[in-house]
Image: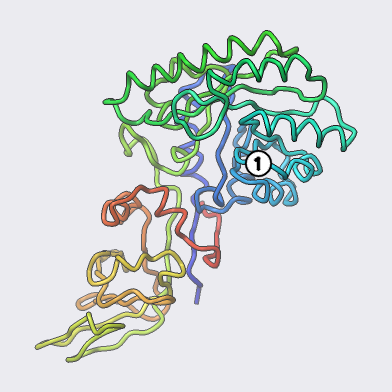
Amino acid sequence: MKNVQLVVSRKNLYHNYSYFKSKLTGTTKLMALVKANAYGMGDIQVASLMQEFGADYLAVAFPCEGIRLKEAGIKLPILVLTPGADNFDQLINYGLEPSIVNEESFISMVSAVKRAGKTSYPVHIKFDSGMQRVGFNNQSIPNLKSLLSQNTLLEVKSLFSHLAAADEPKHDIFTLGQIESFKTMANQIEPLIANKPMRHILNSFGTERFTQHQMDMVRIGIGLYGTSCINNNFLKTPATFKAPVIHIKEVTDGTIGYGRHGKVTSKVKKIATVGAGYADGVNRRFSRGNLVCMLNGKPVATIGNVSMDTFMLDITGADAKIGDQVIIFGENPSPAVLAETLQTITYEVFTSVSARVERVIGE
């Protein structure tokens, strides 16, 4: 019997990659986001596929994520978006490229490069164009200029920023303002950089809606994993989350599960116990009929409460046996349906699939 699995479709992932690649000019590079275990899909597996598909760069959030990929033999350059304040020696040891977001990180990185005896070490400078999270803003540009004018050790590979609301038309004036703000800041900095750095600001949604501002590179994250802000039919669901039926029984009366919330009265019900629970990413809010899974092509709903390692389905009228696979999300139900039930976004659905779930690359 197979364990609970997240099966990533190579074909569907390539379809999504190609959709975004088709929007780019011949010179625009594509950076694939594989942070947070590739949005839950499996970092090493997806990074290997991105390398095979022809991506130019990878990006992760934290140093540990980049180190894991380097140790797995990934050859693509890797941008670390959130390197922290004191991890630069470790980054240099593994050849990872940090985002520099303020004066402190610039100075710390220079010191680390000196200690390592390196020169021309690749870094990426981030600007705050309106997200107001991290990055150099207009007020800090003079200090950045001063740092760059004295710099002999860092090679600025790119200047970049991040859009806050590219998916929402009601914020388009703000988004276009972010793009112009970024250009203004980049124009002030670029003359101080010996090599011409790449520029990038578009994320997945920005690439779909503001394609004309693709600049030198785009960063594709959630779009790779099947979420569009225009029409999800343009993309394919890249993964199927499934778990085996581990027990089947007929129940004539009584209650099912913790808290006795699953009730059986007046007629026989057939109940299947599934070998996955909230510790695997089956949210507890999917209890009591709030999740409809697919079992042998038939929709079946949860009954009772989801527990840590199992949940139960009412499979009355369905043909099933122990070992059959239950589809928690995939083509049907889609991750978007689960996200709507939870009143969240697909990012959270994907990244909630826990580390103990086996990641498998399928067709």
Q: Amino acid at mark 1?
A: Pro
Give the residue furthest to the right. 117
Query: Quick one: SS at disc 1?
Result: loop
Q: Residue at x 38, y 48 (%)?
A: 346
Say above or below: 92 vs 333: above
* Residue 361 vertical placement versus 261 (above, below): above
Q: Nearer the viewer, residue 283 or 155?
A: 155
In the picture of the structure, the residue carrying the numbered disc 1 is 83
Quarter where residue 243 is shown? bottom left
Who is closer to the viewer here, 227 or 93? 93
For the point 16% across and 87% down, the residue is 268
In the rendered image, residue 143, in percent from the top left (x then y), is placed at 65, 19
| Residue drawn at point x = 60 percent, y = 42 percent | 60
Q: Position of residue 306 (x, y in %)?
A: 34, 74
Q: Position of residue 304 (x, y in %)?
A: 26, 78
Query: Percent x, y for residue 227?
Result: 38, 41
The answer to whether 111 is drawn above or below residue 319 in the figure is above
Q: Quadrant of residue 207?
A: top left
Q: How many marks?
A: 1
Q: Residue at x 40, y 20 (%)?
A: 210
